[in-house]
Image (tube, helix red, strand yellow):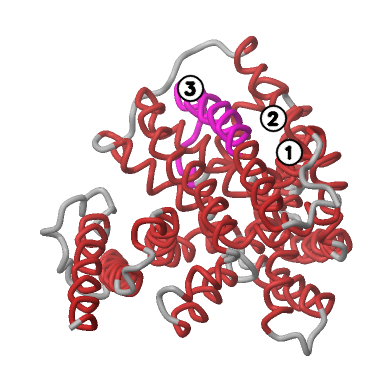
Amino acid sequence: MKYKLTVKEQLLVGLTLFSMFFGAGNLIFPPYLGQEAGTVTWSAMLGFMISAVCLPILGVVAVAKVGGLTHLANRVHPVFSTVFTLLAYLSIGPCLAIPRTASTSFTMAVIPFVGSDAPVAVMQLVYSIVFFGIAFSIALKPEKLTEWLGKILCPTLLILIAVIFFGCLFLHEGGYGPVQEKYAENALAVGFIDGYQTMDTIAALVFGLVIAMNINEKGVREEKAVVKSLMKAGLIAGAVLILVYAALAHVGALAGGGGFDLEGNTNGAHTLTAIVGELYGSLGTILLAGIFVLACMNTCIGLLSSCSEYFYTLVPALSYKKWLLIFAVGSMVISNAGLDMILKVSVPVLSLIYPVAIVLIFLALLQKYIGHMNAVYPVTVGVTTVVSLLDVAASQGWIPAVLSFLPFHSAGLVWIVPAILAIAAGAAISVVARGKESQ
């Protein structure tokens, strides 16, 4: 039995994890951020990278240390564990993230090549059937993902993105565009919230199982060795994400300052189309189509595998293959709602789930110090959940903004101070309870 991966194997596992992270949202949000943030792009990107790179990598580490999301969430309460884990898997699975991979890649790989009178709805249905058929076939063997994602699809994707980036460096003249209203104040905080849209912090909580299977497949089965390899994979994936995000944000910022017709632009797909078209003409459209299909296919395969593995352990009466088929078909149906609709629905859902996921990750990393304080997890997660729920309800206009007096409310981070206070309250309650027990 091996106790560690070779350098080549570790690199492949890291690139596989990057491929699973880097999908539709990762492609369209950094360039759109660059376009909108303009001259303050790097302040906004700092916030974006904290929530879209640092937190996901910390999530991989946290879950690896505790043995899975279910074990981590159980520290709050078994009922919470069941509900939150289901919400996490469904949001990064068939309800939001998986359908988004198909709708985004269709928007970029098919729409530019058809006329205005084309039967788009029918074409999208056919495309989604083919797309999920391919993803289903590859995901049938989740332990072999490094062979597909790490060796083939990921390197190809990185080469194509590099072509766009270096094209901007040498072929495009002009600077960054002006900062738009959204980023005029608190660019870092706004960028942090933008990072939610990648869904990677939630995905990090569930990808560990599939990556661990791939590490096992390479002969490393001792638990501590698997955890160590998984943590290294997270660092490799994080480093590559930072490089790619920086490149895409730079491209977007140049597009914002390049005199393109971006009026009515609602996502980074249009931003990339504008500047790549200028750089490479019709060839650029083909290049961009390849990038989106590869990125979205990578993530789709990883998410299908992760969700199917989890639900198979939850309900083993249905085989992994049957769960995979259910999620592939369900995601195919939802994907036909269209990209803008999926993005619109995802915002309130992620604003509710993300703060709870972040708090769980940090509590797991603090386990050495709070492990004996039984009240910290339930009190902190409970307060964070209630605050996030009230904030989301207010942002949707369902209730008045009852939390507007709290710090960071305008930045969309109203949950931070209550969460910190809840940690202190949970620790105090634990100390008092332990004192009563010892009397």
Q: In which quarter of the image is residue 307?
A: bottom right
What secondary structure prevails in the magenta region? Answer: helix
CB atoms at circles 1 and 2 under 8 Å apart? yes
Helix, strand, or loop for circle 1?
helix
- What amino acid type is highlighted by mark number 3? Gly
Is 162 above or below relative to 196? above
Badge number at residue 291: 1
| Residue at the image position 67 percent from the left and 20 percent from the top | 279
| Residue at the image position 66 percent from the left and 53 percent from the top | 224
Viewport quadrant of the C terminus: bottom left
Helix, strand, or loop for circle 2?
helix
- What amino acid type is highlighted by mark number 2? Ile
Distance Cα–Cα, label 2 vs label 3: 22 Å
Is 418 above or below relative to 157? below
User: In the visual, does 117 lie left or right of 235?
Assistant: right
N-term-proximal mark, 1 vs 3: 3
Distance Cα–Cα, label 1 vs label 2: 7 Å
Is 110 above or below relative to 125? above
Residue 285: image location, x then y, percent: 73, 34
**Which residue is disc 2 drawn over?**
161
| Residue at the image position 53 percent from the left and 28 percent from the top | 246
Foreground residue among 359 and 260: 359
- Dot 1 crowding, Cα within 10 Å, few <14, some 14–19, many 20+: many
